[in-house]
Amino acid sequence: MKERLELLAKEAERAIEAAASDKDALLQLKARYLGRKGEFSGFLKELAALPAEDRKAAGEAINQAKTRLEDAIAILIGGIEGRWKEAALAKERLDVTLPGRTMPLGKRHPVMQVMEEIQEVFFGLGFDIAEGPEIELDSYNFEKLNIPKDHPAREMQDTFYVSSDVLLRTHTSPVQIRVMENKRPPVRVIAPGTVFRRDSDVTHSPMFHQVEGFMVDKGVSFANLKAVLADFLRTFFGRDTGVRFRPSFFPFTEPSAEADIRCVLCKGAGCRVCKGSGWLEILGAGMIHPEVFRSVGYDYEEYSGFAFGLGVERIAMLKYGIDDLRLLFENDLRFLKQF
Amino acid sequence: MPCSYNWLKEYAAGLPSPKAAAEALTMSGTEVESVTETGVSAANVVTAEVLTVVKHPNADKLSLCGVRTDKGTHSIVCGAKNMKPGDKVALAMPGAELPGGIKIKKSRIRGVESEGMMCSEHELGIKDASDGILILPPDTPLGVEIGAILGGRDALLEVSITPNRADLLSIRGVARELSAITGAAFKDKEIRVEETGATIDGLVSVSIAEGAPCGRYCARVIKGAVIGQSPAAVKARLEAAGIRSINNVVDVTNYVMLETGQPLHAFDLAKVGGGRINVRLASDGERLETIDGKARVLDPSMLVIADVNGPVALAGVMGGKASEVSDATKDILLEAAWFVPSSVRKTAKKTGLPSESSYRFERGVDIEGARAAIDMAADMIIRLAGGAVAKGVIDVCKEKQSREPVRFRVKRAESLLGTALTGAACLDIFKRLGMDAKDAGEGVLTATPPSFRVDLNCETDLIEEIARINGYDNIPPHPPVARLVTPEIPGSARFRTRAAAVLAGAGFSEVVNYSFVSRRMLELAGGGEPVEILNPLSDELSVMRQSLAPSLLGNLCYNLQRKNADVRIFEIAPVFQTRPGEKLPEERWKIAGLMHGSRYGEGWNAPGDRVDFYDCKGEVERLLGQLGAASAAFNPKGAPVFLHPGKSASIELNGANAGYIGEAHPGVNARLDLKRPVYIFELDAASIARAASPAHYSAIPRFPESARDIAFVIGESMPYEEIIRAIERLDAKLIERVSVFDVYYGEGIEPGYRSMALRIIYRSAERTLRYEEVEELHGLVGRELTSRFGAVIR
Ligand SMILES: [Zn+2]
């Protein structure tokens, strides 16, 4: 019986192998060999005739052979059915290159994005954020910043007036005064805001944005100013950005400085944007003027501080390569959605 | 201010190249905006005189000229029309090479030999374009290289001078500064005036009235001058500085002003009544016709130069027409004065007459410089216009301006600059800058600034000079050490930033509009008397916004004109409202948005739905929810009148008005030519900040819910919220939530009514509700709807 069993198993294996990719043939083979009336069932009937001590081993041999065949058929059928399913799924194909379904796209205004980025850098350095009114007293905008009436420095900033002593602030510097009048040193403050100058042409907008910053403490120095601002500019424009400081004049700082960065377009070779100089003027700064300290009641012998002001539009234009200031205030959605 | 490099070199011969000088100025605080090569670089171009002009025998448009130089007469073919016999011209001889690369040689033009070319200013490289050939002044000598006449090759430095540096408003001043920075030696010109005339005292007198804002008045007299044109070299320098040539005497006053920074004025002495100059304040209503031909009415704030008959000039601002130097003038009264800066500034502003002269006086002229300048001018006048200078100078000096020494502590400078310094190095810098400086011992220097440095008055001024001359590059950066404390942000600023992020996330793009609008736009949204700008750029930008809505509507129109049909925009900005009794108006931050067009965009797979009121309301609810102020109530009353009366609401937070939402009124649409409905909301940032509360956890229910639906027909004027509240009040514990899932008007429903379907979630926090309990409650809801609202259950 053992020999016959092996012979039959071999025959069945060969038959299964031959029918490996035909599901119907495999089902027929399953019935023919393993079915209730299949060829292996004949062996089971013979078991009864065997002596009791051989019966168990023979039974196990029959079952093992059957299981082996059953598994072989099941695996093959499973494989065939799997291939059919995959083929069917493949026909359900989507065009994945069609655009996705989204809600309309909304963007922050580039000027606001840049203004917030600037704030974040200084917030990270522990600068408070402060705000002041856009309609400001002459005394805060000018006089307490060491710009008396009838001073030529007033010509640097053409002013919109609301009354003889109330105006649209021409810079964010009055926030310096407002903060210092209310807080003793040490202070470090960043003041973003909208400012106004009576000037409108291709490169001037009557309204624009500034970020003012200042720091007052014992021993704050011009070397500190250079370090903080160069660090800021390199954080913003890239670690290897060239930065230079050159003397300038603002009535409310002394010494005063202007900071330039290496032209982001020509890398210093000279181009239209940098007017051939290879440098771009990027911010004004300086050590807070003794007259400003006097106007807010800070002791100039005890404390010192630096202040700076950045034009946000200019930085946004450089950052995004925008070549026309007016685009920033036209609010064309085709422009706004690019940032 | 344009500065001729060659002119600068007359004072500092050892200057580095124009580019290097420009860089040195820029890095010491005087920005040089550009360096332009100018002047004539051509050799073999000489002055010549046109003798004859005849038509070219073979060409209508050409002339044949006989032109004489010191070497003889030359035959020249010329295409220009503006020369006539006797004119002095610039003749390029064979072998000359002109700036444009043109090489001149003998040539035949239409069969006639031409022995050179008469040049235009363009061909000489002086101007970008020119009309005809250059005609030189009649007294130009012949055979001189044109470079020697027109100033030769030069570079023009466009110097931007900060308002504090009055001392740099001259060639001499810039040269002096360059010398201090670069070390090139500065050498003043030696001026010696040949006084051959009568004594001045017998000719004129000068007095300064008590209290008149005039510190010094110098006068000289030149008799017998001949008024004519200035030499080309003088004209060229004036022109490069943007000053029009008038005549030789007036040109000298301007030339010397450009060179020394001292404004000068020349009067026709014959027109100065009695030869008596009185510097005084004008009396009210006095009149003066200024050189520009305008009649000016003066007031007592204005300083005038007067003669016996009345004002002859506005001091430091502009001369009078009657006493100006004209072709008929023979005798000249020359003025070099010092007027108080603020007085000149006020007068120039009042009369609207800013001039080169007033510009310098306002900023501060060197009071010690008047004498040298008037001598230089007198000397130059007799050289250009002849005549004799009267003996002596009248010099009325009211205030001797002695400068006080300034104390300078080396330690203080070190601490303010954050860098190490030595007293000796500082002393050296002060001396280079023309100060009288001494070491006073114990780390203190004293330095007396020169009279021309009106900007140097205190220790910090001197510290800046040290930093500037040393170079900012030589101060090593050093990060500050500061106390570690958490920074503060104003509460509403935080909300505004978050609101912007939420709105951008919801598909709104941020716009930035001017804070000022036109009255016409402002009135779209109403709102009472606005803050008005006294000097607006235009009517379009003349009043401060009281609402952001008009600007957003403007943005919508702008975008629709550009075929951007789907518009979702927002703006966060303050608006302005006058406050009685307060100088400053109230400024309140607003968060406003506008929706127009399709709901989902124009995608291939998007339904073509258009946004409606509920899209807009949904965005407001989402925004408020994100900001922690979800408890807003929408009140059908109280929305502004520019909104549709039936499709708008005021928004209330904790019972207080916090904004509005609605469809723009059809009247507004009509005025703006808008075809489709527009939805707008505007929220008050501070109100949201006040109403917002941090999230607070409530337990997740442990027992199952029972949901029941109810549909009914109800009068359409009954607001949904009232219905909901009535149901919720029936059992606050067991009725968890009521929501609407269908609202229907139309067929099958009587006009004035609507059908509504609600889902009610019943749940207890303590146990599972029994079926009977839920049924009973739900029955109660039905009865409440019927009895309270007259609803008919369906
Ligand atoms: Zn560049």
Image (cartoon, grey):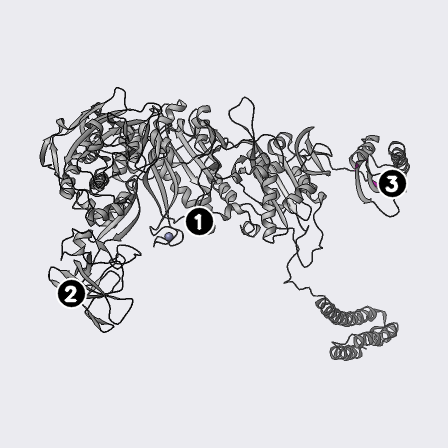
Label 2 vs 3, first from the N-terminus:
2
**Residue ID at (88%, 43%):** B750
Helix, strand or loop for disc 1 = helix
Q: Which mark is residue A318?
A: 1
Query: Where the N terminus of chain A falls, by quadrant?
Result: bottom right
Query: Where B607 falls versus B181 (above or below)?
Result: below
Q: Which mark is residue B713?
A: 3
Q: Is residue B584 left or right of residue B459?
A: right
Depth check: give the residue in front, B686 or B731: B686
Q: Is residue B206 left or right of residue A277?
A: left
Q: Nearer the viewer, mark 2 or mark 1?
A: 2
Span of residues in magenta: B701-719
- Disc 2 + disc 1, Cβ < 8 Å: no
Q: How far is disc 2 from disc 3 in space, using C-alphas?
A: 112 Å
Query: Where B555 falls versus A169 (above or below)?
Result: below
Depth check: give the residue in front, B689 or A87: B689
Q: Give the image location of residue A261, x and y in percent.
A: 37, 46
The amino acid type, in three-letter code, at marker 1 is Leu
Q: Do labels 2 and 1 share a chain?
A: no
Choose top left, top right, bottom left or bottom right for residue B695.
Answer: top right
